[in-house]
Amino acid sequence: MRYELYYWPGIQGRGEYVRLALEAAAARYTDVARLSRSQGGGVAAIMRMMEGERARRAPFAPPFLKAGRLVIAQTANILQYLGPRLSLAPADEAGRLWAHQLQLTIADLVTEVHDTHHPVANSLYYEQQKPAARRRASHFIRERMPKYLDYFEQVVAGNPRGRGHAVGKSLSYVDLSLFQIVAGLRYAFPRAMRRLERKLPRLRTLHDLVASQPRVAAYLDSPRRIPFNESGIFRHYAELDQ
Amino acid sequence: MRYELYYWPGIQGRGEYVRLALEAAAARYTDVARLSRSQGGGVAAIMRMMEGERARRAPFAPPFLKAGRLVIAQTANILQYLGPRLSLAPADEAGRLWAHQLQLTIADLVTEVHDTHHPVANSLYYEQQKPAARRRASHFIRERMPKYLDYFEQVVAGNPRGRGHAVGKSLSYVDLSLFQIVAGLRYAFPRAMRRLERKLPRLRTLHDLVASQPRVAAYLDSPRRIPFNESGIFRHYAELDQ
């Protein structure tokens, strides 16, 4: 099976959680929109798929994954599908429900991170909503970010035979996503994160454990890993990191 | 199996999607926090469970469902678990992934509805974030609400042998959730909804189809259905419905 991932070609965004899973498992895949237009890529490729699927089971938004005849959207749904196929999820039902539950909690956090710079509307520029962004980011840093991160720290601590993994005894898509959360928050809110991280030894260790997996390390070093930037979800605006 | 639902006792909120599924299937369940404190209910019951689960697989937030030894959180995850057990989901894998994908898109819409009255912080009162709420609600009504509703209208249209159902050929948790979306948006944004609904004949029909299911109708008529109110997710503030 060769998977096709459809996601905005210029950002990590929500597609990154899927990219990390495919890369960590050395899955065969094409990141379709990152191909050149002459190769059938670009944003046009995403639009073609969404229009072509119109009459049937069209996604509401990217990312979506083509797996044979299936087209699956919603990041956590894609990872739930890929998990057992890429050996990145627990084998038992309870473990899979738990992994998915955590991934959905990560998705909620990602939305809150996004809304720190876009609290009013996605269709406006950041510059058009700066006062609200400053207020939202301030509450996020003081209330929500510690609440989520403390929770995930507890999750890792509550998996004592997991050798540092979030669920089960080996690498899962939840570990990969938590790596991305730590990396992204360090990029977006370096000051806040430095302070918070002192109390998050398990998440720090998990981040390093994931980053040192040979396939993940190779991916992070490659041009396939898009750098963080101010079009993505994790954006660094110094005025929001207070 | 007798299920135990744990959710805030004073609001419909995210718990309502689970309540509707349990009610439509005539499942045996206890809405634990709605019991009196002497019966072991109240918000304290939610807190006890979250603390008791602390060391193991604690939910980040309600709603969560106790099903035997399993404790499952995240609304869409709960519905995915209950779906096949309550005959409220398609039988095939592709159909179940599709139903879950739609439910996750509904969850995204629910978050956006919530943020129309809380664009800055959940820990502040609405009254402390009114200017930002007005801007966010205006964009929501003009851009996001039509985009989501048109999408779901297309979904129902794209299921031509579904006899008005969103997925498959019979009632599913997706239908129940779309009913709740229509009912909630009518409550929160009656002016905007009246205008938009003209172009949503299938969603209107689906709403009525669900409301006329005998078990659902009995539930909606009972004291078990908490009325919409201004502590929930769908809130009616006339100034936001412009």
Image (spheres, coloured by chain):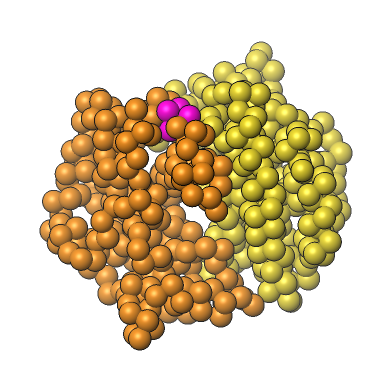
Chain colours: A orange, B yellow
Q: Is residue A204 left or right of residue B105?
A: left
Q: Is residue A162 left or right of residue A214?
A: right
Residue at 27% across, 43% down: A187
Residue at 15% across, 60% down: A221
Q: Position of residue A128 (x, y in %)?
A: 51, 44
Main SS class of the magenta portion in the image:
helix
Q: Position of residue A63 (x, y in %)?
A: 44, 63
Does B61 appear above or below B52? below
Q: Is residue A225 left or right of residue A37?
A: left
Quadrant that contains the N terminus of chain A: bottom left
Residue reaching furthest to the top: B38
Give the magenta-colored segment's residue range.
A135-139
Q: In this orientation, does residue B192 appear? A: yes
Camera-side residue of B223 and A12: A12
Quadrant that contains the C terminus of chain A: top left
Does B166 appear above or below B3? below
Residue at 68% across, 45% down: B138
Residue at 76% across, 41% down: B241
Q: Position of residue A213 (x, y in %)?
A: 15, 54
Q: Position of residue B60 (x, y in %)?
A: 46, 34
Residue A136 within the segment the image draws in magenta: yes
Q: In this orientation, does residue B14 appear? A: no
